[in-house]
Image: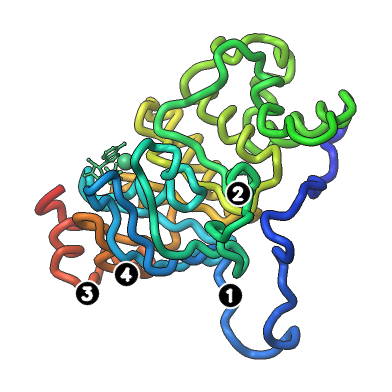
Amino acid sequence: MRTAPAPRRLARPPVTAARHPAPASAPGAAGPEPPRLAVENLTAWYGEMTGVRDVSLQFPANTVTALIGPSGCGKSTLLRCLNRMHELVPGARAEGRVLLDGHDIYERGVNPIAVRRSIGMVFQKPTPFPTMTIAQNVAAGLKVGPRLPKRRQLEIVEHALRRAALWDEVKDRLEHPATDLSGGQQQRLCVARTIAPEPEVILLDEPTASLDPSGTTRIEELVQDLKREFTVVIVTHNMQQAGRVSDVTAFFYLGELIEVGPTTQMFTAPTKPQTEAYVTGRFG
Ligand code: ADP
Ligand code: MG
């Protein structure tokens, strides 16, 4: 029986020239860890319409942050700004800064494709490539630069599927079409595809919206597990889910960040009246 390949870092060009700057202070010196991802004064438009207004927010490493708020408050828009997918919408633009390890992903010369590998996204509905096999789907994000030897690629596929808690269910049918899988399995396949290029941040936009309760539970357990290795941001309109999976919760209303804090505090003792009204179910 084969054992799982060891964790690896994929050799890939850095997003910016110096992606991992030397720490500002000596190791062991006091002071908070810099956030893995930081948003500074971000405003995003669709044409003349403002979707997100002047948001500043930090995402610490190895933390799950939930973005909550009523429909249309800008959660998905903000998420798509975090990996430069917002600009793919015709007429859409954003201003402000998004810093990954201190480096602005919107800086001139930064390759948005490399950004999207470092900051991967999983969508509301599972989006496997329908004409590809299970294995091909996982490897789909890797196809850049020189082709990897087949064996190496298989190792990466296995490792990503294991980390997405899907390996045992698909190991005997890696060459079957991805569409053979159930919705919940397809969503974990999409997580595996996002993990394969070794991102630093994983963004999930209502990843359980189309799943049944058991599929939802599997994804929620997976999210908890992923934070050991990644920084996770999850959009959810389900407050119980935010309570179960997140460490930090940010509440949005009409495109603005109203309040952010530890999840328990946000649900038991929010400081803003709008947050309280939302978490107690008075609107939304
Ligand atoms: P949420 O994810 O919180 O439901 P969205 O980020 O999808 O909210 O939407 C924020 C605002 O931006 C809404 O008013 C919505 O109608 C608008 N919006 C979202 N996507 C588009 C788009 N592709 N084109 C134009 N307006 C959009
Ligand atoms: Mg949304």
Tell me, for residue 25, which label it has, or none.
none
Would you name the residue on which mark 4 appears? 265
Q: Nearer the viewer, mark 4 or mark 2?
A: 2
Going from N to C along the chain, the mark reached first, 3 or 4, is 4
Q: Is residue 73 left or right of residue 93?
A: left
Going from N to C along the chain, the mark reached first, 2 or 3, is 2
Tell me where residue 55 appears, x and y as whole percent: 34, 65
Please say if the residues under marks 3 and 4 sit with CB atoms less than 8 Å apart. no
Q: Seen from this angle, which residue lies furthest left? A: 282
Mark 2 CB within 8 Å of ligand 1: no
Mark 1 neighbour density, 10 Å: few (under 14) some (14–19) many (20 or more): some
Q: CA distance from mark 2 to mark 3?
A: 35 Å
Going from N to C along the chain, the mark reached first, 1 or 3, is 1
Tell me, for residue 34, which label it has, or none.
1
Which image quadrant shows ligand 1? top left
Would you name the residue on which mark 2 appears? 115
Please tell me whether residue 103 is drawn above or below residue 73 in the rendered image: below
Name which residue type carries label 3: Thr
Q: Is residue 225 among what the camera can see?
A: no
Mark 4 neighbour density, 10 Å: few (under 14) some (14–19) many (20 or more): few
Please tell me whether residue 28 is drawn above or below residue 130 in the rendered image: below
Would you name the residue on which mark 3 appears? 271
Q: Nearer the viewer, residue 267 or 157?
A: 157
Going from N to C along the chain, the mark reached first, 1 or 2, is 1
Q: CA distance from mark 4 to mark 2?
A: 32 Å
Q: Seen from this angle, which residue lies furthest bottom? A: 30
Residue occupying image coordinates x 43% and y 44%? 87
Per the image, label 4 sits on a secondary structure element best described as helix
User: For the image shown, how many numbered marks are present on the structure?
Assistant: 4
Please say if the residues under marks 4 and 2 sit with CB atoms less than 8 Å apart. no
Mark 3 neighbour density, 10 Å: few (under 14) some (14–19) many (20 or more): some
